[in-house]
Amino acid sequence: MSVTTTARFEIKYRSYLTPEGRLTGTPPAIASDPDLLKRLYRMMVLVRIFDSKAIALQRTGQLGTYASCLGHEATHVAIGAAMAPEDVFFPMYREYGTQLWRGVHMEEILAFWGGDERGTTFRDQPLDFPWAVPIATQTLHAAGAALAFKLRGEKRVAVTVIGDGGTSQGDFYESLNAAGVYQLPAVFVIANNQWAISVPLKAQTACETLAQKAIAAGLPGLQVDGNDVLAVHEAVSEALEKARGGGGASVIEALTYRLSDHTTADDARRYRSATEVEDAQKKEPIGRLRRLLVARQLWSDQDEEALVQDCQRQVDVAVQSYQAYGRPACSDMFDYTFAELPESLRAQREAALAEGPARG
Amino acid sequence: MSVTTTARFEIKYRSYLTPEGRLTGTPPAIASDPDLLKRLYRMMVLVRIFDSKAIALQRTGQLGTYASCLGHEATHVAIGAAMAPEDVFFPMYREYGTQLWRGVHMEEILAFWGGDERGTTFRDQPLDFPWAVPIATQTLHAAGAALAFKLRGEKRVAVTVIGDGGTSQGDFYESLNAAGVYQLPAVFVIANNQWAISVPLKAQTACETLAQKAIAAGLPGLQVDGNDVLAVHEAVSEALEKARGGGGASVIEALTYRLSDHTTADDARRYRSATEVEDAQKKEPIGRLRRLLVARQLWSDQDEEALVQDCQRQVDVAVQSYQAYGRPACSDMFDYTFAELPESLRAQREAALAEGPARG
Amino acid sequence: MAKVTLVEAVNLALARALADDPRVVLLGEDIGVNGGVFRATAGLQERFGPARVLDTPLAESMIAGLAIGMAAMGMRPVAEIQFSGFIYPTIDQMINHAGRLRTRTRGRLSVPMVLRAPSGAGIHAPEHHSESNESLFAHMPGIRVVMPSSPTRAYGLLLAAIQDPDPVVFFEPTRLYRLNKQEVPDNGQPLPLDTCFVLREGGDLTLVSWGAMLHETLETARWLAENEQVSAEVIDLGTLSPIDYETILESVGRTGRLVIVHEAPRTAGLGAEIAAEIAERALYELEAPIIRVTGYDVVTPFFKLEHDFMPSIDRIRRAAHQVLEP
Amino acid sequence: MAKVTLVEAVNLALARALADDPRVVLLGEDIGVNGGVFRATAGLQERFGPARVLDTPLAESMIAGLAIGMAAMGMRPVAEIQFSGFIYPTIDQMINHAGRLRTRTRGRLSVPMVLRAPSGAGIHAPEHHSESNESLFAHMPGIRVVMPSSPTRAYGLLLAAIQDPDPVVFFEPTRLYRLNKQEVPDNGQPLPLDTCFVLREGGDLTLVSWGAMLHETLETARWLAENEQVSAEVIDLGTLSPIDYETILESVGRTGRLVIVHEAPRTAGLGAEIAAEIAERALYELEAPIIRVTGYDVVTPFFKLEHDFMPSIDRIRRAAHQVLEP
Ligand SMILES: Cc1ncc(C[n+]2csc(CCOP(=O)(O)OP(=O)(O)O)c2C)c(N)n1
Ligand SMILES: Cc1ncc(C[n+]2csc(CCOP(=O)(O)OP(=O)(O)O)c2C)c(N)n1
Ligand SMILES: [Mg+2]
Ligand SMILES: [Mg+2]
C-alpha cells in the first residue's frame, strides 16, 4: 500500500470534582475515604495560609522575592499525598504543598526565599532535591535518580513537577526521552497554570495539550483537572504504581491556574485581564473540596474556623523560627564548596572571615 | 463527563516505489515526469561515485575522516530537487546529494573533510549553511532563518536534515516548538538511518516512529520510505508548498539505512550484524529507481555506462581541484575571526606569520 | 533632556536601534507586553509591533540558535536572556556557531547578533539571579563581550553592539539598573568597542574594573583622594573582549601600580587575563605586584551573604594600600 | 606487566573502579558494545554488563543531568562526552547544579560524578573535535578539573577523580591517547588531586603545562639541556582546578623564570590565572616577565592549519630564551 497509518495516539482528560463541589463519573477510591479527603483539605488550607503570610512578609521587607502557589494547592498536595516516603521529589520552585506533606518545614521554605542556604537542608526530608530555579533542569535529575533506583533494583519512584513554560526547554524533552528509553520509574507532572510569567500557553507552544509531549518520548500522557484533588491523586497514584511495578514513566498534565502574580516581583495586571483571573478564581481547588466535604456533612463552619486558627498558629510558629535563623556564617560560603576545603580556598576563607560581616 | 478524549493523532507512512522497482498505490506526479526521474537518478549515481571516491581518498591518506552517505541518496537528492533556489538548506554532515543539487561543489565537500575552511565558502551557493557537526544545533538555525523569512514576508523556506540520533537532542525539540509557535516556513527532515554511530534506534528512543515527535510541537508529522525518491520528493514538495503558503512547518521522517560505517573512523562490524546490512542493501534506493527506469524503457545499459563514465570524470576533475587547494594561508585563521582585525589580535597574527608554516 | 537610569538608557538604545534599522528585531522571554522582567523593553512592543519585539517560548538555547539563524540571514537580532544565571544553555550555540560562522565560511556568512543579559549580585535576588560569568564568554574567539557601567555608556555601547558586524554578548549590571541617573542624549551615537574608558585620571595607582564594581572602585578612588591625597586612575574596561590593553598599559606605565576589581570568582576570572598581560608587558614598570580584588572561588551565595562575597570598598582600599606600600 | 597507552590506562582505571566499587556506573554515547569512539571503554560492557556500562541517547545535557541525579542518589557515575567540542550543553547542569548542590544544601546532597571528555587538537580530526576548553570549567566553583599527561597519571588521576566526593571534569588529551606507552601497574592506587607533578627538575627556569602540550614542553626542556646546558624544571599541573600553587611558587622561587604553555586560546585561558597568581605572590623573585605560550585567540582551525594554531617547540623555546635573557 502506498499510504498506511503506522501509529495512533490519543490524550484523555480526567476530572471528577466539579467547581460546584459535586462528583461526576466514577470517582476514584479516595472519594470514599473521608479521612484522607480531610487530610488533603487541611493541607491545602495550611498551604494557602502559609502562602499569603509569605507574601505579607515579602511586602514588609522580611522576605526576598517569593513565588506564590495560589491556585495550585490541589495539584501540589495530591502529589505529596500519593508519593511514598521513600520516593524522591524534584520540585521546581512553588510546590510547597508537596513539600510540606513530605516533611519539609515552612521555616525552611521561608529561609530559602529569605536568601539563606540553610533553607534547603530539609532536616526531616533528607533526600528530596532543593528547588530548581533554572527551569526544567530538575527533570533530568529526576530521570537520573530514577535510573539509580532502577539499576539498584529499588522500588522507588522519582517525581518531578514542571510548569507549562518549562515544557519548552530541551532538558524536559531529554528527560522524557531518557525515561522512555530506560523505562524509568519516574513521574513527570506538568503543572499547567496557563502562564509562564507573562507568556500565555498559546505563545509557548502550538500543542493542543501538553500531555501530548509524552508522545515524543513514547510515554503515556494524561490530562487531569489540576484543581481536582481527587483526579490528580488518582492519576499520580496510578503512575506511581505503574512505575514501581517496572512499567516505566508517565507524564501527567494537571490543568490549573496561577491565581497570583508570577512572584512578588511581578505585576500580572500588566499582561492579563482581570476577567480571566476572576473566571479562574471560580474554579479554584479549595472551595470545591470544601463544598464536597460540607455536602457530605464531613465539614462544618466550626471545623473551618478551628482549622484556620490552627494553620495560622502553625504559620506563626514557622515565621518565628525563620526569623530566628539569623545570618549564616560567612565561612559557610567556603565550607560546603567541596567535601574538604582545598588549600587554595583556605587563604580566601581566612581573608573573608577577617573582613567581618559585610554591609548591604 | 469524568473521562474524555481531548486530542487524537496519527502518523501516516508513504511509499510508492518498491525495492523491485515497481510503483504501487497512487504515485505522485513526478512518476510521469521522465526527465525529472532521470535527473534524480543521475544525481544519485553521481553522489554514490563521489562517495566511494572520497572513501578511497581517505583510505590513501588524502582526506581526513569522511562521513559516507551510502544508502541515503534518495532522501538527500529528493530534498535538493524539491527545494527552490531561494530556499535555504541547513545540513548536518552527510547530505551531499542535497548540496550538489543546490550548487555546492564536490571539491568544496572534499576540502571540508580535508581540513580546510575554504570548503565551506560554497562559491555558487552563497546562502546555505555549512555543515553542522554539533548534532541538532542546525535545526535552530533553520528555525531562525525561517523566522527571518516570515518577518520579512519572503516566500522562502528553511529546510534542515537531522539524524535519528539527533532527534534526542533538546535543540531539535526546541526548534520544532519554535516552528510551531511562530508558524514558521520550515521543513524538518529526519533522515532515520536506524543508527547513531553504534546506537540503534530502539536505544535512542521508546517511540514507535520519529515522525510522532512532531506532535510534541503541534506540528504535522509524516513517515516516508526514505529509499523511495518519489515518496520523499512528494512529501518534501508538499511541505515546502505548505510552508511557502503560510501554513507552517512540517516534520518528515525518511526511513532509510546507513549502509556504510558511520565515518571512515568507524568500524560498524563491531556493533551490527552482516545480515542486517545485507537485508538493508536489498532495499537501497538507486537500484530500485534504475529498475523502474529500465522497465519503462527510459534507461539502457549504454545510458548507464555513459553515466558512470561521466560521473567518474566529474569526480576526477573535482578531486584534482581539491588537490590544488594547497594549504590555506595561516593569516586566514585571524582574518575572518572578526569583520575587522582587533588590535589585540594584530600582534598574535604577526607572531603567527613570523613562525612560518608549522610541521604536523 | 530628562535624566535616565541605566535600564532606561538600555530601553532608549533599543528603541533607537529599532527605529533606525529595520533589520533590528528583539526577542526574548517576557520582553513583549510585559516589557521584560527588568522593564528594559518596556513599551517597545507597543511602539514597534509584535513583529519587531518577539516574546519567545522558554528556552535559552533556542533563543541563541534562532538569533544565529536570523543574523546569518541578514537581520540584526537582539536577544535577551532573563538573567545571566540562565545564559549557560546558550554557550553551545555561541561558541560553536555564533563565534565561528564567519571564519568557518571565510566571511560568506556572519552573525551580527547581540545577546543581552543582566549580570551580577547585590539586589537580594533569588538563587541563580546573581551570577557574573563574563569570563566564560571572554574566552570565546570571535565574540565581543561588553559591560557598561553608566547610563551613558549603556546607551552608546549597546548601540555599538547592535551595529557591530559580529556577535556581542552584552552584560547589564542589575545593581546599576536603577542606582542613579544621567543625562543621556538620544542621539544614536555609538561608543567605541575598542577602547577602555578612563573615568578618573590619576598618577599614583591604576584601578581597573567593569560593570557594577566600578561603583565601589570609584568610591574608593574618591576616598583615597579625599583622605590620603592619593590620586587613583580609574579605568572602565567597557569592552571585556577583545581588551584594549594600550590604555591600561599607558596608565600603568605612569602609575606603576595596578589593582583589578571584579565580582566574578577569582580563578580564571577576567582579572587574571589582565594581570597576566600587564605583568608580561609592563613588568619592569611595576612598582608592586598587581592585585586582584574579586569574588571568592565559591558559588555566589544566597542573598543573605551576597555582600560577603562581593568585593567591598574596604577590600579595594586595602588592595590599593598594598600596592602603594608594597 | 605490559606497557599501555594513555587510552588503555583510562580503560584500566575504569575497569578497576567498576570492579572495586559497585556504585560506579559508566554512561555515554557509544561506550557500550562499541567501546567508545576512542575505545576508552572497550570491553567494559561485555565484562561488567549493560547495567554498569550504559549507552545513552544522543544528548549531552541529558548525560550530565542524569549523572547529577544518579550521583546525588549515591551512585558514582562516570559519564563520557564524545569530544570536548560537544561538552558545552553540559555547562548549565555542571555550573548550576553539579558544582553547587553541596553548598546549596549545606552538605545534605552531593555530586560525586566524573565527566570525562577527550580534549585538544593535533589528530587531524574534523571540525569541533579539537577544542581545548578547560578554562571554562576551571572558573566554576565546586568543580575539580583534571587533565593527565601520561598513561600512569591518567590511571591514577582518573581513579582519584572517581573516588572524589565532588564533581570532577576529566579531560583526556586525544593527541596523547596512543602517542606512547608506559608500564602502569593496575594497583587501584589513586594519585593526589591536590598537587602538581614535577616531571623534570631544573634550576634555570620553570615550565608549567598540562595535557598534550607537556609533550612539546618536555621536548623543549630536553633540547635546552642538551644544546644550551639550560636546566628547565617542568611541572605538569595535573589538577587544573583548584590549583596547587605551592609547587609552582617553590619552583619559581628557585628559578625566577616562568613560562606557561597551553593549547587553549590565550585570553582568559588558564595560563592567565597562573601567571596572575604567581606574579602577585612572587613578583620580587621574578627575574623576567612570565610568558604564556598558547593557542591564539581564534577559532581552532580545521586541521590543515591546526599545527599553526598549537604552540610549537619553536615557540616554547623562544619563550624560554626570552625569560632567560629578558
Ligand atoms: C532557564 C531559565 N530561564 C528563565 C528563567 C526565569 N523564569 C523564572 S520562572 C519563569 C516562567 C516559568 O513558567 P512555567 O514553567 O510555566 O512555571 P510557573 O512559574 O508558571 O509555575 C521564567 C521565565 C528561569 N528561572 N530559568
Ligand atoms: C552534540 C554532539 N554530540 C556528539 C557528536 C558525535 N557524533 C557525531 S555523529 C553521531 C551520531 C549521529 O547519529 P544520527 O543523528 O543518527 O546521524 P547519522 O550519523 O546516523 O546520519 C555522534 C554521536 C556530535 N557530533 N555532536
Ligand atoms: Mg506556568
Ligand atoms: Mg542515524
Image (tube, coloured by chain):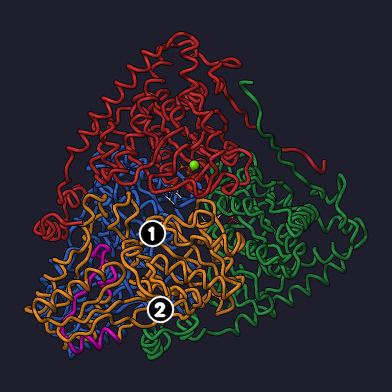
Chain colours: A red, B green, C orange, D blue
Q: Chain of mark 1?
A: C
Residue B35 falls in which quadrant of the image?
Answer: bottom right
Q: Is residue A40 left or right of residue D288?
A: right
Q: Residue at x 43, y 86 (%)?
A: B357
> Is B174 included in the stretch rendered in magenta?
no
Mark 1: which secondary structure? helix
Which residue is at the front of the view, C102 or D300? Answer: C102
Residue B159 location (% of width, % of height) = 67, 61
Magenta extent = C247-273
Q: Looking at the image, is C188 positioned above or below residue D246?
A: below
Q: Which residue is mark 2?
A: D309
Residue C53 falls in which quadrant of the image?
Answer: bottom right
> Is C263 included in the stretch rendered in magenta?
yes
Residue D153 location (% of width, % of height) = 25, 59
Which residue is at the front of the view, A109 or B12? Answer: A109
Q: Is residue B165 left or right of residue D231?
A: right
Q: Which residue is mark 1?
A: C84
Q: Which quadrant holds the N terminus of chain B? A: top right
